[in-house]
Every structure is written in structure tokens, then in C-alpha cells.
Image: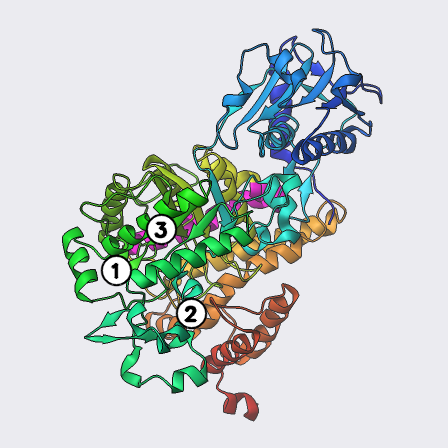
Amino acid sequence: MKTRQIVVILLLALSAAAARSAETLTLTRDGKTDYAVVVPENAAPVQVSAAAELAETLRKISGVPFPIKKESEVAAGPDAKLLVIGPSETSKRLLGGEVDESAVPYDGIILKQAGSSIVFSGHPVRGPLYAVYTFLEDELGCRWWTESESFIPKTDRIEAGDFDVVYAPELIYRESFYSGLTGRANAQIAAHLKTNGASEDIPPELGGHHVYQYFVHSFYSVIKPEEFLDHPDWFSEIGGRRKVAGWGLSKEDLSRIPAENIGEDGSQLCLTNEELFGVFLERVRKELDAHPEATIVSVSQNDCGGWCECGKCSKIAEEEGSQSGPIIRFVNRIAEELEKSHPNVLVDTLAYRYSRKPPEHVVARDNVIVRLCSIECSFVQNLDGEYGPSLVTGRRRPADEPQNRSFRDDMVKWSEHAAHIFVWDYVTNFSQYLIPFPNYRVMQDNVRFFVRHHTLGLFEQGDYQTTTGDFVQMRAWILAKLLWNPDTPLSPLYEEFLSGYYAPELTPLYLEYFELLSDAAESTGEVIGIYRQNTLGWLDLETFNKCSDLLDRITAKAEELERSNPDLYTGLLYKVRRERIPLDMVLLQNYNAYSEQAQAEGKEFRAPARADMPAFYEEFRARCKAAGLVCVYEGCSPERFEEYMTDVIGEIVPPEEKKAE
């Protein structure tokens, strides 16, 4: 898809150019350059990539090729014109001791003008590449929206200067978990957005990513549930019986276990069993030996209830005032032993559901990560007891939600019990991906809250199974930006993406749409969790009508723009129609309720007549198909998706009525 001009970025670039002093560097002029990109003699793969990215992007901007040379081929004098990829001897000389490259924190960058040269350096794992990306974005106006869509400005005269950046992100683990950023196919955009999580399969030449052994919910990955047949004492005692979770067993094994030994709410492990501890440790060590690339190993509870109630486990839980007590003590023992054989590996465990409450006494070892999960929270309110700021006016209102207050208290206490805190946060509705999720205003507030309470790693779980939902491309991009720098102003991020990915003319309309949805949710005081089946209760008929009208105007404007300038706006109408799918899903889900209300109260309902709904539904399904949409909720299969959609239209036009027509 062709890139389009970004009015906002160009205006900023012009403003910055006007403000530059005499120190401005001219990198290209009249189809030529005096500059060379310089790499160390034995450049690391990430430095080679940084040099190639810089040279190639400068060529795309100006049409001028930039040579890539080794240090031995250049002289780094005060008048030299070099674009130096560090850390290296050349970057060290140019920096002159002003910045100690060896002391830059993890993922930190150095982007400094040194005479007529520029140094791109930082922490050796990703720093030089991130410095290049920062320069191309902040100084030259390049943007990467998705794996296939970007903006590279065009000019025959590249100028840059008056910048001095030494920055390291507070979050060392940054994962924006959307399908558009996961997997090797999306490694380039994940690197451009400076994410580095386990699912973002970034190769070493682009800086790599954090590699887990197992991931989360690993108890049954290490101790197989079928081992219950020979070692029932390794598993939870529940109600006086040893039990195993039935979902982990084959039909054959399940038939061999009495029903009373199957945990109705699942089952965990008996974490005070010494034989279990020895086997668990041995297996984890073996897996780490087989996967030396792993830097984190998960030792964490299954995704269910069923904690152990045996005498020893119960005593620890009572002493610690929480079921997190037996877990942290067990994990600490594993971590202490692993430190001897695998000193560079951290041990990750969960503070999740029944184990979310911190223990009273035990403190996690320094090589343990406690990953706190916000699954019970309401996501239209932030975690500081407020609603988020308006994207237009910046105003906010108080909103103290008990579920969030409880989580906030646990977060504060965990920061006293663990040196390394990761957070598993949620930014979508897992029961219904295809309806609006009005957390637009609070995403930044919550990232800031986590960082303020000593969080080092943040996993933002979004619509990882689908490329279509409530503005998933925008959300993935904005969250990645906030993970890198939580203090990046929020409203400009929305404006930048909306203008660049869609069109500047649509930006105020889309912002008004987000404001309408946010105001509607806030005005009800509703808890907006991650398992809501529909919008009834917070999206009223009047707001739906206003949103529908806005999207009609956006569609009409997109049609006009694409018709008048198809080269600049190719694909705009498709994206606008795709982004309407969530509100149209609301129409389908709430059609009967809204119709009854409109009739009873004499109000307008902006929707087709019931007789016209089959045609509307067919057009809606065509848009879903064009977007590759085969999933409506977490774990949904294409077959279940078809069944769900058939049921939705069947509620509006029963099959027998449709057949009669």
C-alpha cells in the first residue's frame, strides 16, 4: 500500500527546521552527501542492521546513497562528517567522555551531535538500532504504522541538528500483544516500535527479544497431569482428596481416575511436597540446558483454582495471610537452586486471582519476577481512582472503583515484597472482541501507574487472535509508544496515528467518536471488565445514534478523499469500513433492545428496518470476510464464529421468517 503525506508531521518538521541554529547539519544537498555511515571493525549483527537501516532510509528520503564504512576507513577528526554506529572506538572519541557508553542502562540510547558528526549508540543489545529509529522518527519524520504501512518523507535536502538524547526506558520488558506485532512475520514493525516481549519474535540482528522457557501457567508444563496416576501426592489436596484438573488429561487417562479425584475448579500442585520439588527442579534445569537462549523461566500456577489444602500448604498460607505464600516460598527455593547453575536466568511467577494478594512476610528473591495480573479490574476507570483525561479537553473526573482500589492496594504492597515486578494488563474485551472497549482515556494513566510502582515489565494483552476489532492497529501502536516512554502526551499520539494511518481530515471526527463512547461509559459508573458480552448497560440508544451518524460522516469523507486523490488515499475507504465493524456489531447485538426502546419512547434508532436487516447482515459479513475476520472472542474457532454470527442475525430475523420471505 502506498504511503501518504502526513500533514501534522510536515508541520512539525517545518517548525523544527525554522527553529534550528547554525549548528544544523546538512546530510544531503543537490543529490550528494559528504557523509558516511561508520560501523566498528567487528560490528555486532544489531550494529550492522542499524547501519543498513540508517543508510537505506536516508536513501529513500533523498534518493542519495550513503556509503557504509568501517572505522579503519575513516578519520574521526572534529570536521569529519560521520554517522557513527556505536558503541565503538570512534563513538568513544567523538563523545569525548561526555557520555559513558558502557554505563547506559538496558535498552538505553545515545543520540548526540558531535561536531559535524552524529553518534548513534547505547546499550549494546538494542541501543544503536533504537537510536537510529529515534533519529529517523523524531528528527526526520519517518513513521511505521503497521508491518505493511509506513511514511517516509521525500526531500533532496536532509537537515538535522540541535538534538541531544540520552534515554533509557524504565520498562525493560515491553509487549504490546496484538496479532500485528507478534511472530517473525511482524518482527520488523515490533523492532521499529521498540517492543521486545516473548511473543514478538524479533531476530538477533534486530535486537532480539526476551525468551521464556515455558511462559505462564507452567505447573502442568513441568509436571504432567497424567502423572497423577502414579504420584497423586504431587497434586493439590482439595476437600480431603488429592485431585487433578481434568482438562489436562487424555480420555484414556481420564477414564482411569475416579470422578472424586477430578478438581471441579481445576487443580494445582502440592508445593510443600519434597519429592515434587526435586523432580520439578531437575526438569526445569534440563529444559534450560536445552534452551540456553532463555533468560526467564516461568514457575507459575495453572489458569484455574484448586490450590492445595494439605496441612503443610495450609499452614504456610495461614502464616502469610495469602495463597501467594506457598507459591513464593516454593519459587524462592527453585530460584535459589537455579542461581547456582543458571545465574543469568530469572524465575517468573504469577500473582493472579487467588494468589494476587501479597504475602505478609516472605519476600521474593532478587532473581524472582512477580507478575501481577489486573484481570479483575474495571478498565474504563484508571487505577488511581479517576477516569482518564478527555482526548480533546484534557478534563477528567473522579471515579473510585472498588475493584481497582483493591488492585491498587495489592500493587503497592507487592512493590515492597519483590524487586522485580512485571504486570499482565488487559486492554480488550475477551468475550467480545468486536464491540467498542472504552478504555481510550486510561491506557496512559495505567502504564504510568505501573511504572510508578516499580514495574519493570509490562505485557499489554490485546486482540492477539484477530487483525480486526476496536481500532486494534491504533491501540497496538499507541501502547508500544507508551511502553517506551509513558510520559509521551496521549492526545498527540491519537492525532498522529489517526492523521497518518487514515487521513488528517478524519482525525477530529474519530476523536469525537472516542469521546462519545468514553463519556457514555463514564456517565453510567459501570464496571467495564474484560468479559462483557455486549454494550447494554453503558452504550445508550442516544449515544449509539450519535456514533452511527459520525461514522456515516467519516465514511462519506473517506469516499470523497479516495475518489479525489486515489494515489494518496488508496485503501482509506476499506479501513474506514473495517473500523465500523465494532459499532455495527453493537447494532446487531442490541437491535431488538434498541428497537423496543425507540418504539416505546418515540425515539430515533439509526438502523435499517427489520425487513432490510438480512441485506445489512450480508454486507456486514462481506466486510468481515475482507478483513479476514474469523474470531469474535478469545479461543473462538472459525466454526464457532459462523455459529455465533448465525445466532446474532437469527435473533433479529428468525430463520422461519427469513425463509417465508
Q: Which residue is mark 2?
A: 224
Residue type for callout 1: Thr
Eyeballing the image, is 504 above or below 576? above
Label annotation for residue 437: none
Please indicate, yes or no, whether residue 503 appears anywhere in the rendered image: no
Q: Are marks 2 and 1 in contact (CB under 8 Å)?
A: no
Residue 654: % across, % down:
48, 86
Q: Which residue is mark 1?
A: 272
The residue drawn where x is 68% and y is 21% is 84
The residue drawn where x is 59% and y is 66% is 629
Range of residues picked out in magenta: 497-524
Residue type for callout 3: Ile
Residue 553: % across, % down:
56, 54
Residue type for callout 2: Lys
Judged left or right of residue 515, residue 638 is right
Check if residue 163 falls in the magenta segment. Answer: no
Judged left or right of residue 330, residue 440 is right
Q: Are marks 2 and 3 in contact (CB under 8 Å)?
A: no
Cα–Cα span, label 2 and label 1:
18 Å
